[in-house]
Image (cartoon, grey):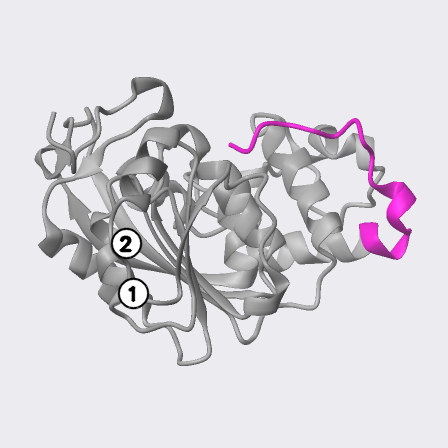
Amino acid sequence: MPDDRLRPKKRLGQHFLREPATAARIAALLRPRPEESIVEVGPGEGILTRHLAALGAPCLMAVEYDAAAVALLQRQSWPGGTRIVHADFLDWPLPAGNAPWVWAGNLPYQITSPILFRLLAEREQVRRAVFMMQREVAQRIASPPGTRESGILSVLLGAWYRIETGFDLGPEAFRPPPKVWSRVIALERRSDAPPVDFAALTAVVKAGYGQRRKQLANALRPLALELPPGWAALRAENLILDQWLALAEQLAARGHKAYSDSVCFDDE
């Protein structure tokens, strides 16, 4: 195995980009402003990192979990302001001194949703993110509330970010080739984001989609909400964003003690 290549680890879901031209297309979608620093999630062999570093941001933090990848990256020469960080991105604290941020990365399937939830948690500091993920996942999160394909992340991301479709990549674009197609998307923070309590919206959306086959009267029963006329027989996939916001406002008005810790479901 050449020194500039890694042996992909199946347990980490590693599929490395083959072509620098593809990495250049991804980096071009990020469009950082002069004052914004960049976080790359999982740089791997560094093919995208090179193009992100060329964007000239004040700081580029490439956060990698795999020790072998970290060692490979640290052997290379990088422009000033580039930092290779050996850490689990989900546990790594976002440095406060470099805000605001834009994020980029080729996301392993098994941690795509946790990373998107972290983006939501850091939404005040992260204006834009460009991610590559499994195409079917990208299609689901881009499905607007009120459609059958919508889910928890559709609603939450839709409240704070606009989702832009970039381009698709077939399995041959990666080493090793995955069994699925991938899609690059950009998430741009909305300037008109609703002034809704994040915890309250998360609670009602997780309750509704956590039992998506049930009518809202049953799915939301643990939250003891008063449903408007005609809503009780609806299901989570029938509600548009404004309806979710109305439910969240009702829950938030009762205070944080109303958020039941027992209402905890998977993200999709």
Residue 47 showing in the rendered view: yes
- Magenta residues, start to end: 251-268
Query: Among all residues in the image, which is located at the extreme top?
Result: 11
Main SS of the magenta segment?
Answer: loop
The residue at the point 22 percent across, 61 percent down is: 51
Q: Nearer the viewer, residue 1 or 262?
A: 1
Can you identify the residue that label 1 sits on?
A: 79
Residue 77 appears at what percent x and percent y? 25, 55
Marks 2 and 1, how far apart at CA: 11 Å
Query: Among all residues in the image, which is located at the extreme bottom?
Result: 34
Q: Helix or strand or loop: what does disc 1 sit on? A: loop
Identity of the amino acid at label 2? Thr
Which quadrant holds the N terminus? top left
Identity of the amino acid at label 1? Pro
Residue 98 appears at what percent x and percent y? 54, 68
The residue at the point 74 percent across, 35 percent down is: 220
Residue 260 appears at what percent x and percent y? 83, 34
Residue 107 appears at what percent x and percent y? 36, 40
- Snapshot quadrant of residue 23: bottom left
Q: Nearer the viewer, residue 226 or 52?
A: 52
Magenta stretch holds residue 263: yes
Q: Please determine whether, in this image, residue 193 is positioned above or below residue 235.
A: below
Q: Please determine whether, in this image, residue 251 is positioned above or below residue 123.
A: above
| Residue 49 tag number | 2
